């Protein structure tokens, strides 16, 4: 929103021709209509990129958001992830994974990612699980309501991982945890 406030103060002047002003206005409108937040974070589209990142992230929580750049809930989560990336950078790394990529379907099947956005956590190449009171402990499904919620979850995972745990309890109250129903195929 800082961009919008700065842009609104910008007026056509001799130094900033009306043509340049119109082009900048069009670019801003296209950016706001597309609402793409994913360009601010690393986006992975190949299995080799994901494998490499999982193996190379040492002593930090790796947060992988599986989803689409065009989905509105993914954009909400991307906004939270982007705003917190700097604050959690000492103990976490964040990357986005494009669920529509053919290479990534191996991970989508392995983690049973049927709802997006789904966030999966790793620590030193180990898959970290979280008991949030839902049926699935392997991933976080949905967006975080607040920036602090995401920080609390990542910090809880980091502290648990440093103690050698592979599953931690969710630090959030139940009313701030997204609810969903699991539908199992071929059961």
Image (spheres, grey):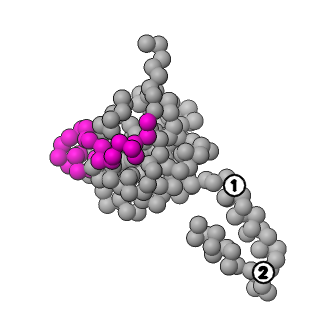
Mark number displayed over residue 94: none
Task: Say left or right for 115 vs 58.
Answer: right
- On-image quarter of the C terminus: top left
Mark number displayed over residue 33: 1
| In magenta segment, residue 118 | no
Say if residue 146 shows up in the picture. Answer: yes
Which residue is under mark 2?
Answer: 12
Residue 70, horizontal then vertical, whole percent: 62, 45
For the point 63% across and 75% down, the residue is 6
The magenta stretch is 157-179
Real-space CA distance between mark 1 and mark 2, rounded to the nearest whole angstrom: 23 Å
Residue 65, horizontal then vertical, whole percent: 46, 44
Q: Residue furthest right?
A: 19
| In magenta segment, residue 174 | yes
Task: Say left or right for 134 vs 39.
Answer: left
Q: Residue furthest top?
A: 187
Q: Residue furthest bottom?
A: 14
Say if residue 95 shows up in the picture. Answer: no
Could you classify mark 2 by the number of other residues whose Cα lies within 10 Å: few (under 14), some (14-19), or many (20 or more)?
few
For the point 53% across and 50% down, the residue is 76
Task: Say left or right for 51 vs 5.
Answer: left
For the point 57% across and 55% down, the residue is 37
């Amino acid at each position: 929103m800082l961009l919008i406030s700065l842009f609104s103060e910008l007026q056509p002047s001799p130094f900033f021709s009306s043509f340049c002003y119109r082009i900048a206005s069009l670019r801003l409108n296209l950016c706001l209509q597309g609402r793409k937040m994913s360009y601010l974070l690393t986006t992975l589209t190949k299995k080799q990129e994901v494998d490499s990142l999982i193996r190379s992230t040492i002593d930090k929580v790796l947060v992988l958001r599986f989803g689409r750049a065009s989905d509105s809930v993914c954009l909400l989560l991307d906004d939270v992830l982007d705003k917190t990336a700097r604050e959690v950078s000492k103990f976490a790394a964040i990357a986005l994974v494009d669920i529509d990529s053919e290479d990534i379907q191996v991970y989508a099947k392995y983690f049973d990612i049927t709802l997006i956005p789904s966030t999966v956590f790793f620590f030193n190449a180990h898959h970290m699980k979280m008991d949030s009171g839902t049926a699935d402990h392997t991933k976080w499904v949905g967006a975080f309501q607040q920036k602090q919620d995401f920080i609390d979850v990542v910090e809880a995972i980091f502290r648990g991982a440093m103690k050698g745990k592979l599953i931690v309890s969710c630090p959030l109250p139940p009313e701030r945890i997204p609810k969903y129903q699991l539908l199992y195929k071929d059961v």
